Image: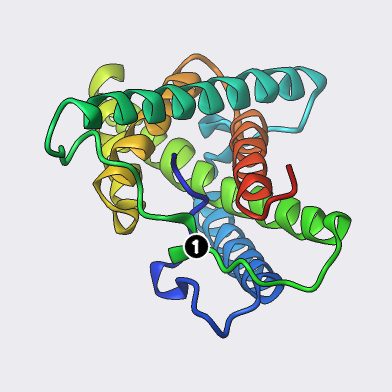
Amino acid sequence: MMLPSMDPMAAASSSMNACRWLLNGSAQALSQFVLLYIIIGKSGKLSYHGAKALCASDLLKAVLLAFLLLSSSTIYIKISESFQQYSNGSWLFSAPDAADTYIPQNHNMGPFGIMALSFIFSLSVAYREELLYRLYIVGSMRERGLGSFFSVLLSSCIFAMGHGYQGMGGFASAFVAGLICATAYQLGYGLHALAIGHGLYNFFILLSVFGVF
């Protein structure tokens, strides 16, 4: 399972409240997204890389992407659990570190409050990551003549490295998610479809971590 990512230095502590963690993470991700958007916008290639106006088809694509991400995460966990039963451990099929290592569990909000903050956090992180890892990195590689296969592979490795602090299981799970998102980008998914789909995945993971369902 790939956990929604922010600065690993912001890992959960016993004194940190989940609401504050979500607010801090949202502010961090949004500020970084705006900075990236301005920097990429200076090149005049935002539209070329896939940053276009939101349309209805983006929402349908986002739902499909979220389904694929959740399905791949579930399959990876099942494979990991099965593999661990027949081996003494594997760096590849190890489970990601426990969620409460990075996401604080304590909060004094009702389910709707924690859902609202989780949704804002999930979308903020997803827009930042999709703008950087897919639109900018994959788009730049493609623009420089690197083939689709290597663009998808390299960008997925870089994306997984950003989740490496979650352990090798988190790295492997993020790599698979990166492959799915980068492939979707190559197939014509734009910023909104990628970010909303990724954000929905993050949202469901957070709701599970916080015990909302």
At which x and y percent is residue 191? 61, 35
Instruction: From the viewer's perspective, tell me whether residue 36 is left or right of residue 159.
Output: right
Outermost residue toward the top in this view: 187
Outermost residue toward the bottom in this view: 15
Instruction: From the viewer's perspective, tell me whether residue 109 is left or right of residue 183.
Output: right
Binning the other alpha carbons within 10 Å of mark 1 as few (below 14), some (14 to 19) or many (20 upward) gives some
At which x and y percent is residue 134? 45, 36
Residue at position x 85%, y 61% in the image = 113
Tell me the element at label 1. helix
Looking at the rendered structure, the kind of residue marked 1 is Asp
Quadrant of residue 196 within the rendered picture: top right
**Image colouring:** rainbow
Quarter of the picture containing the C terminus is: top right
Front-most of residues 141 and 169: 169
Residue at position x 29%, y 37% in the image = 172
Q: Determine which residue is flagged by label 1.
A: 100
Quarter of the picture containing the N terminus is: top left
Residue at position x 61%, y 21% in the image = 67
Front-most of residues 29 and 203: 203
At which x and y percent is residue 210? 66, 55
Outermost residue toward the front in this view: 85
Residue at position x 37%, y 41% in the image = 137
Task: Classify 189 as above or below 49.
Answer: above
Task: Classify 114 as above or below 19.
Answer: above
Quadrant of residue 15 within the rendered picture: bottom right
At which x and y percent is residue 147? 25, 19
Instruction: From the viewer's perspective, tell me whether residue 113 is left or right of residue 64.
Output: right
Quadrant of residue 106 within the rendered picture: bottom right
Instruction: From the viewer's perspective, tell me whether residue 108 is left or right of residue 201.
Output: right
